[in-house]
Amino acid sequence: MSDGRSRASTVEVAADPLTAFAAFTDELDLWWVRGPINAYDTGRLVEMRCEPGMGGRILEVYDAESGEGLELARITVWEPGRRLAWTSSLDDVTIDVHFDPTATGTIVRLDATVSEGGEDRGGSSFVSVTPSWFGAWMGRRDTAPREAHDLARVALTLHYARPAAAARWLADVFGFASPNTLPEGEDPLSDDAYGFPWIEFHVGNTSLMIEPLAGSSVDHTQVTHVPWVFVDDLEEHLARVGKDGATIVQDIESHGFTSYVALDLEGRRWRFAQARPTQPR
C-alpha cells in the first residue's frame, strides 16, 4: 500500500510468461484456495471462473450447468503472456497484472488501484492472495491433479491467549501449513480493515482457524477435547516435534491406531497418529 489508494504484489514462478498467463486465467479454479472466507458466498460456490478475452467476466459460479453466479469483474485488457487487467463489478477497484520474463521464469506483478473517492470492498483481494496461492499452485502444477482441492465438512477453531505466537509455533513446531502469510506482529494483534486478522491452517483437507481467547485463561489440565492429526511418518514427526520444543506427554503407543500426545505452547493437548497409506492428504 503506497498512498492508501493502491496496492501491489509480485510472485515469481518457474514458467514462461505465456504459460503463467494461461495458468493464471484458465486454471483460476485450481489455484483459488477454498476456505470459509475466500468467496462472497462460500456456501454456494462451485467454481471460480475467468472468461477469456476482452469483456470476459471473473465469476463466482454457483451453478455449473447454467454458469449462474456472481460477477466479480470485467476484463479490460487481454494480452496473453504480457498483460491482463479488469475492473471490479462490486466496488471501485481496477487490477492490472503484468507477466514479465526472467532468466528462470516469470514475475507476475499485480497492481490494484481504487478510483478517486471510491471504495475497496474486497476488489483488491487478488493482490493479497496471488503471491501465496498462485505461487503454490505453480510450484505443484506439473504433478497436481486437475481438480480443485476442496475442504472437509468439519472444521475447527481454537482460541489462544496469544494467537499470533500460537500460529507461528504451530507452523514451526507441528509443521502446519497456512495458505496465507501468518501475521508477524506481536500479540495482541490490531484489527485490520475487516476485523481481527484471519489465521487459518489447512491440515489435510480440514480448516483450522486460530482466534483470540475471550475472557479468562483456560486451564488445559482439565482436558475437554483433543484434536487428532494424522501424519505420514509418526516416528519422524515425534522426533522433530520434541526437538523443536513441544512437551511430549505420551510416547508412541498402539491400540489399533498408533499415536503420541504432545502439548502446544499454551498447554493444549494434540494427538498425532500414523496415517494410512491411502488416507487423503
Image (cartoon, rainbow, N blue to C red):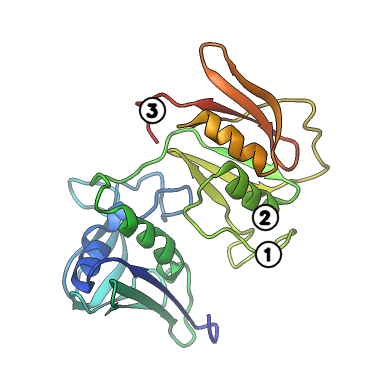
Q: Quadrant of the C terminus?
A: top left
Q: Which mark is residue 185?
A: 1
Q: Could you tell me how far apart the alpha carbons at marks 3 and 2 are, in whole angstroms?
A: 30 Å
Q: Which mark is residue 38?
A: none
Q: Residue furthest top?
A: 256
- The answer to whether 141 is drawn above or below residue 233 in the figure is below
Report if the CB atoms under discs 1 and 2 are less than 8 Å apart: yes
- Report the residue at 42% width, 82% height from top: 113
Q: SS for tag 3?
A: loop
In this rendered view, identify the residue nearer to me: 4 or 171: 171
Q: Earlier in the sequence, mark 1 or mark 3?
A: 1
Report whether 126 appears left or right of 227: left
Q: Earlier in the sequence, mark 1 or mark 2?
A: 2
Q: Is residue 226 visible?
A: yes
- The answer to whether 239 is drawn above or below residue 201 in the figure is above
Q: Could you tell me how far apart the alpha carbons at marks 1 and 2 are, in whole angstroms?
A: 7 Å
Q: Is residue 57 visible?
A: no
In this rendered view, identify the residue nearer to me: 46 or 230: 230
Percent of width and height locating residue 121 = 48, 69
Which residue is label 3 attached to?
279
Percent of width and height locating residue 257 = 52, 16
Amino acid type, callout 3: Gln
Q: In the figure, residue 183 lies in which quadrant?
A: bottom right
- Report the residue at 29% width, 78% height from top: 102
Q: Earlier in the sequence, mark 3 or mark 2?
A: 2
Q: Could you tell me how far apart the alpha carbons at marks 1 and 3 are, in whole angstroms?
A: 36 Å
Amino acid type, callout 1: Gly
